Image (cartoon, grey):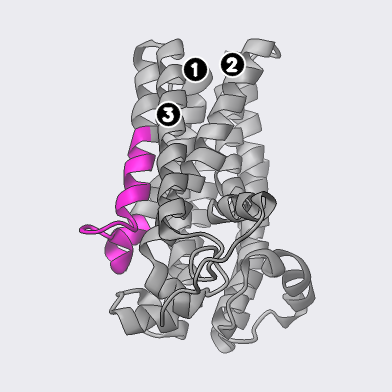
């Protein structure tokens, strides 16, 4: 199937297509980690200088970093998108491949310049952490979709790449923005790595048909939906379990009990989905289909919509736990 020929469009149409290829809804995925890293430092001051540094970091990891990886993905995955997501800017003809190339090239240049300026401004070991982190993210974002590596072809490579990009480096960068790395933050970054790994495993449901045709080795293709859910759920449960243990060991007993309660809720949801991988957690259908899923769940794959229902519950609970522990750590270090 050939992409739809690009037609004459207004400047506004082109601008919308250039923004869409950066996939703005994905930008927010790194923001909880950035917020957590900053809070856990306990060192940010209510000054214009600190607010501007934080704004630059949000831009580097959101519109620039995550946007870059999404644009590169669309550029190199045209054939897959013609099967899985034909309404995307390139296969629909709203952008040419050349225009898409300019899109991610310019975004990459701005991201590198902004990141180096921020890291240089901070200086020292903290500056090195910031620069190394975001450069690692940009590199992984490129080779995730671009040949010859194309990490997304195999879940053994794509999962860790996503976990590092969306879970580890935002936590470390945000923490280093205002303080030396807190040891607790390294633990939390690790937990986010595994949570990101579990979610990307399930997110592959939406592209299962195209992945199978292209020989992509996602778990959804290799072992089927039910077993994919089982593997991902085991990882999620371990994350919550270790989180509870860490909270207890850091002296946050009430949070540990709240985390265990969160895990209990997650286990109930997981049980329902394992019984019915396509229609489990049906009470969440309206919330997902009319809101969350309407924005990012454009796939017709039933298991993907089931994953979105699980993801909405899981992500809210995990986010609450993260922000609480980050606030408690920030208070601890403010008083240290």
Q: Which quarter of the image is occupied by the C terminus?
A: top right
Which stretch did the figure color magenta? 135-160
Instruction: Give me the C-alpha separation between circle 3 and circle 2.
Output: 15 Å
Task: Give the class, few, some or many, for how many residues have Cα within 10 Å of label 3's Cα (few <14, many ≥20).
Answer: few
132 up-or-down from 320: above or below = above
Q: Is residue 65 magenta?
A: no
Are the two marked residues, 2 and 1, in contact with CB atoms closer than 8 angstroms?
yes
Outermost residue, front side: 8
- In the rendered image, which residue does mark 2 sit on? 43
From the top left corner, tell me how far across and down residue 273 is, in percent: 59, 81
On screen, 132 above or below 48? Answer: below
Q: Residue 287: image x %, image y %?
A: 78, 70
Nearer to me, 335 or 311:
311
Mark 2 vs 1, N-terminal side: 2
Q: Visible in this render: residue 191? A: no
**Residue carrying label 1:** 179
Kindly identify which numbered label has been placed on residue 183. 3
State the residue at coordinates (34%, 84%).
Answer: 213
Kindly report the distance in space between the C-alpha atoms of the residues bearing marks 2 and 1: 6 Å
Q: Secondary structure at mark 1?
A: loop
Q: Is residue 155 magenta?
A: yes
From the image, state whether disc 3 or disc 2 is nearer to you: 2
Up-down relation of residue 305 to residue 164 (above or below) = below
């Amino acid at each position: 199937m050939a992409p739809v020929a690009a037609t004459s469009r207004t400047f506004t149409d082109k601008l919308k297509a250039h923004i869409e290829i950066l996939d703005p809804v994905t930008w927010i995925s790194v923001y909880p980690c950035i917020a957590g890293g900053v809070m856990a430092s306990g060192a940010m001051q209510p000054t214009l200088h600190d607010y501007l540094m934080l704004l630059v970091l949000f831009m580097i990891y959101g519109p620039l970093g995550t946007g870059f990886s999404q644009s590169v993905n669309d550029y190199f995955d045209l054939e897959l998108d013609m099967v899985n997501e034909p309404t995307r800017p390139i296969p629909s003809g709203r952008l040419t491949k050349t225009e898409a190339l300019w899109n991610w090239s310019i975004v990459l240049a701005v991201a590198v310049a902004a990141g180096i300026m921020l890291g240089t401004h901070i200086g020292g070991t903290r500056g090195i952490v910031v620069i190394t982190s975001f450069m690692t993210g940009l590199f992984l974002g490129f080779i995730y979709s671009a040949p010859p590596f194309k990490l997304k072809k195999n879940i053994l490579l794509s999962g860790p790449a996503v976990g590092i990009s969306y879970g580890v480096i935002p936590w470390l960068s945000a923490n280093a923005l205002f303080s030396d790395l807190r040891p607790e933050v390294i633990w939390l970054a690790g937990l986010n790595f595994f949570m990101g790994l579990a979610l990307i495993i399930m997110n592959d449901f939406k592209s299962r048909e195209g992945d199978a045709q292209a020989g992509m080795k996602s778990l959804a293709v290799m072992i089927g939906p039910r077993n994919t859910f089982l593997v991902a759920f085991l990882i999620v449960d371990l994350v919550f379990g270790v989180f509870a243990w860490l909270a207890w060991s850091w002296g946050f007993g009430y949070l540990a009990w709240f985390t265990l309660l969160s895990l209990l809720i997650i286990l109930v949801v997981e049980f329902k989905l394992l019984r019915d991988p396509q229609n489990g957690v049906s009470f969440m259908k309206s919330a997902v289909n009319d809101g969350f899923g309407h924005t990012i769940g454009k796939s017709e794959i039933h298991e993907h919509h089931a994953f979105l229902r699980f993801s909405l519950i899981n992500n809210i609970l995990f986010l609450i736990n993260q922000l609480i522990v980050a606030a408690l750590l920030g208070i601890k270090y403010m008083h240290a």
